[in-house]
Amino acid sequence: MLCEFRARLAEADAADRLLQVMLHRLTEAGLLKSGGRQRTDATHVLAAVRTLSRLELVGESLRAALEELAQADPDWLLPLVEPEWDKRYGRKVEIGKVPGGKAGVTALAEAFGRDGQKVLAAVWAADAPPRLRTLMQVEILRRVWVHHYDWDARGRLRWRDGHALPPASLRFDSPYDTDAHYCVKRDTAWSGYRTHFTETCTSELPEVVVHVATTIAPVQDGELTAQIHDDLAAMDLTPAEHAVDAAYVSPTQIERAQRVHGITLLGPVVPDHSHQAKSGAGFDKAAFTIDWDHRRATCPQGNLSREWRPLRISGHDYIQIKFDKATCLACPVRPQCTDAVSGPRSLALLPTRELHEIQQHNRLDQRTEQWQRRYAIRAGIEATLSQNVRACGLRRTRYRGLPKTHVQHVLTALACNVTRIADWIADPTHPRRAPSHFRALCTAPN
């Protein structure tokens, strides 16, 4: 019965509606209001499956497909089985050190590949029962083979090199949870998911979790910023100020948050990484005057740019500005401006005046002590995530698949809110701890 209830919660947005009911009741009780301040952060979630190497993944995927075919149509499968398959796939595939180094690994992988290709060819043969092609593990086997094998010019199945694999967002790490993906973030590498918690942090009200998002691990934090704001707006719980770390912030997101929802997105934008800015002695981008109306820039020496054109870098739009080569070569302060051997100084700006001004303003503002004091409140969300990791097991999902994992995260947020509301409204049950003798001495009135 419990698994059926969980399955219903995983359908559509049923779990999110459960959180919305709680938030509505808290609003009615005066414990939650729109406006104010909120903060968001994410943490990694480990999948509820065994960690597999690439070699173990292909072997275990084939074993899982053979197991499912043996249950679905043993008479059809039996003629395909080769003598060594019992030893190779009769129990879970566990591979330690392979003799022969890289060549040995490739040889074993291609042996797996030939076995799997034999099964796939038989399943898709014209005389095979059509229902076998619809089996889940058979489809997973086909996808794993697409990810990890290709055909050479002579038509032979070959094991892909690591650099030739599809992106981690497209391939999975286990045949038993195809939503679990590999990701590396700084010093942390894991296979699984990423969860984002948003909580209120207004001083006169209890801190409650108002939004939960769960994604596959490779989805970057910044891709969730707009979705979080839209979801909060749909619940009429948009904050006046939203504190987040640098991963959620860009000038585009700052502009959208203010324009669409009236939210001040508070977080550090990416600093200027040019060598001029890092040295502190050269002419960085802020030293140039940009005339957006006449599409030109003026350098610190008063020279005008000669080129203004659109530029696209890694899928993002910019404006590229270049100065006259002869003027730059003759400039007496050229070493402070560019380290190019013979080329002129160039600038890459965000595509609109508004985005450029947001970027420059925030880069200056986030250096101030006043901004740092405002931003310090963001650190509290890390304590919330830590609390839920330790008390509610947030670090590892109990279930397989993104929908059920999200259910777990929403229920975790509900439990967190119940605990916090209970602490907020309850009378103290224990007398206040007496201060130490030294503290009493320090705080005693003169």
Image (cartoon, rainbow, N blue to C red):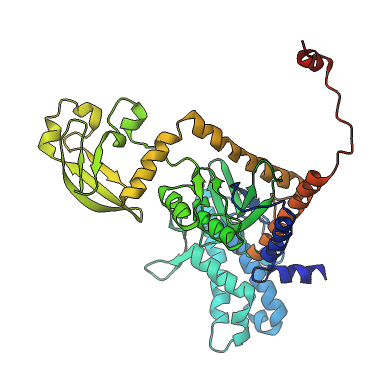
Point out residue 405 in the picture as x, y percentages from the top left corner.
68, 60
* Depth order, front residue of 131/178: 178
Q: Can the viewer see residue 84 in this picture?
A: no
Is 362 positioned to the left or the right of 378 in the image? left
Most distant residue in the bottom direction: 127
Dividing the image into 4 quarters, which one contains the N terminus?
bottom right
Is 169 on the left-hand or right-hand side of 177? left
Q: Position of residue 299 (x, y in %)?
A: 21, 35
**Is the residue 169 above or below the residue 78 in the image?**
above
Compared with 362, 318 (above or below) is below
Q: Position of residue 279 (x, y in %)?
A: 34, 27
Residue at screen point 78% across, 68% down: 3
Q: How many marks?
A: 0
- Split into 4 quadrants, where in the image is the C terminus? top right
- Residue 208 visible, this orientation: yes
Which is more toward the observer, 404 or 248? 248
Q: Is 109 above or below relative to 305?
A: below
Q: Report the front residue among 244 and 435.
A: 435
The residue at 84%/15% (across/down) is 437
**Image position, residue 430 (x, y; %):** 89, 35
